[in-house]
Image (tube, rainbow, N blue to C red):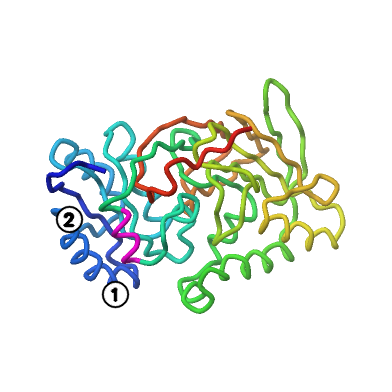
Amino acid sequence: MFGPDPKTALLLANPHARQVQQKLPKALLQLQILGLEIIQESVQDPDEFPPLIRSYRDRVDLIIVGGGDGTLNRVVEGLVGTDLPLGILPLGTANDLARTLGIPLSLPEACQTIAVGHRHRIDLGWVNGKHFFNVASLGLSVNITRKLTRDAKRRWGIFADLITAVNVILTRRPFKAEIGFEGRWKRVKTLQIAIGNGRFYGGGMRIAHDATIDDRRLDLYSLEIQHWWQIFTVLLALWTGRHRRDLGTRTLSGTEFEVVTAKPYPINTDGEITAHTPARFRVIPKAIEVIVPRKKESTRKKR
């Protein structure tokens, strides 16, 4: 991947995450055995990640992040424009970006991927000046984020998002919004609008069954349930990514979208609330490099 000489990596992790505290020391040792020189910075506030990455731009060969999608969301702004590749140690609950990229969830295998894997350029999503990897959404997802406790994550693991989603769907009322797409506007009454860049989000749910993170497009869905029984078909669609308008889900694909609401609605990007409506979304093609297994040299699908 990098050549015969040992390379230097800046390792960043969320020190408060339980899995990081338990598993990071072994991963650090394995990375060193595999020939990487590791610089580990102690950062208490994840908001310090972007400026720290930029300060190391000319001193390291890659950035390694230990954590889940929320931690990666805090790192992305620092990576843009640096040309530093990203290696991922999947130490979160869902690890949706790792799943999308085919990175092993086994820590020893993930370390091996970082050491001998392949550099691959991926797209990023963008909303109101904020970049994201997986998905940006408003409506249900924000309520799920607010209700999803650490205790629920520890008890239910990757199923915590789905269990919380079911509870929220059964209690939330739809809101009105306007979606702008290719010069046209559509008024909708919806429970959630989600705009995805990758494939997986929310612990394994799918934005679209054929989405990839390097297809230069965004995939939008809007949950417009008309009858109570459609809750079940929508839940199935969220898990498989196979949405149908007649069963309660509107879908669109493109490079740019706008969403307007009567009052500002918070927007969740990769599990973190980072923006509000009115919002403009767009895809940024080939924005950064990530390190993926060699067998995954291209995740691109022909369309």
Residue 155: assigned label: none
Is residue 108 within the magenta segment?
A: yes
What residue is rendered at 68% in x and 38% in y? Answer: 262
Q: Look at label 2 and name its amino acid.
A: Glu
Toward the bottom, the furthest residue is: 155
**Mark 1 Cα shell of 10 Å, populated few (<14), some (14-19), many (≥20):** few
Residue 191 in view of the camera: yes
**In this orientation, which residue lies closer to the viewer: 255 or 44?**
255
Q: Which corner quadrant holds the C terminus?
A: top right
Toward the top, the furthest residue is: 183
**In this orientation, which residue lies closer to the viewer: 208 or 298?**
298
Is residue 23 within the magenta segment?
A: no
Residue 166 place in picture, x, y as percent: 68, 67
Magenta highlight range: 107-113
Horizontally, residue 253 falls left or right of residue 285, namely right
Do residues under tags 2 and 1 come within 8 Å of each other at their CB atoms?
A: no
Residue 22: assigned label: 1
What residue is rendered at 32% in x and 49% in y? Answer: 117
Q: Which corner quadrant holds the N terminus?
A: top left
Q: Which residue is mark 2?
A: 41
Q: Look at label 1 and name its amino acid.
A: Gln
Residue 256 place in picture, x, y as percent: 59, 28
Label 2, label 1: how many angstroms apart (C-alpha)? 17 Å
**In this orientation, which residue lies closer to the viewer: 223 or 31?**
31
Residue 16 vertical position relative to residue 201 in the rendered view, above or below = below
Q: Mark 2 against mark 1, which lies toward the viewer?
A: 1
Mark 2 secondary-structure assignment: loop
Horizontally, residue 29 falls left or right of residue 156, namely left
